[in-house]
Image (spheres, helix red, strand yellow):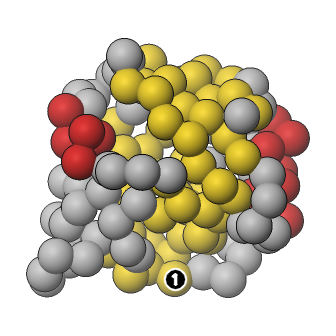
């Protein structure tokens, strides 16, 4: 762990610590950037200016994890159950690359709606 990014989604601001993957580094180097959210159950995802391959891919996530979804060229923030899961763990629609974890409580993310502006910066 090392590099940190901050998110501003509407009026919600929080930080995340990134892991040492190549994908996490690519996201950090691309910041700052702005996009608009999409909500899919307990997942917020949005397109980002990074295009890279799957790295250490998996589908079952934990609340608070952040991942890169290569198929959608998107960043995903998992905070609760998703439509394809069978329980309380978030499950991605297809394999994603885990890149980090949100600092602090994630319950506030439940109030984020579709098409909310999100800005990602170096923390």
The crowding category of the residue bearing disc 1, from other C-alpha atoms within 10 Å (few below 14, some 14 to 19, many at least 20), is some
* Rendered residue at 62%/70% (across/down): 97
* Rendered residue at 42%/51% (across/down): 104
The residue beneath circle 1 is 58
Q: Is residue 38 left or right of residue 95?
A: left
Under tag 1, what secondary structure?
strand
Please state which of residues 106 and 110 is positioned toward the viewer in this rendering: 106
Residue 79's x, y, as percent? 30, 57
Residue 43's x, y, as percent? 32, 53
Q: Residue 20's image quarter?
A: bottom right
Please state which of residues 57 and 19 is positioned toward the viewer in this rendering: 19
Please state which of residues 38 and 4 is positioned toward the viewer in this rendering: 4
Please state which of residues 11 and 36 is positioned toward the viewer in this rendering: 11
Q: Is residue 66 left or right of residue 45?
A: right
Residue 76's x, y, as percent? 47, 52
Q: Is residue 75 left or right of residue 55?
A: left
């Amino acid at each position: 762990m090392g590099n940190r990014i901050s998110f501003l989604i509407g009026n919600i601001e929080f930080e995340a610590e990134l892991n040492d993957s190549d994908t996490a580094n690519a996201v950090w180097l691309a910041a700052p950037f702005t996009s608009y959210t999409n909500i899919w159950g307990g997942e917020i995802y949005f397109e980002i200016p990074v295009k890279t391959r799957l790295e250490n891919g998996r589908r079952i996530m934990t609340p608070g994890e952040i991942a890169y979804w290569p198929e959608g060229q998107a960043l995903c923030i998992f905070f609760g159950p998703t439509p394809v899961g069978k329980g309380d763990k978030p499950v991605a629609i297809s394999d994603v690359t885990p890149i980090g974890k949100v600092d602090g409580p994630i319950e506030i993310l439940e109030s984020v709606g579709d098409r909310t502006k999100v800005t990602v910066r170096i923390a």
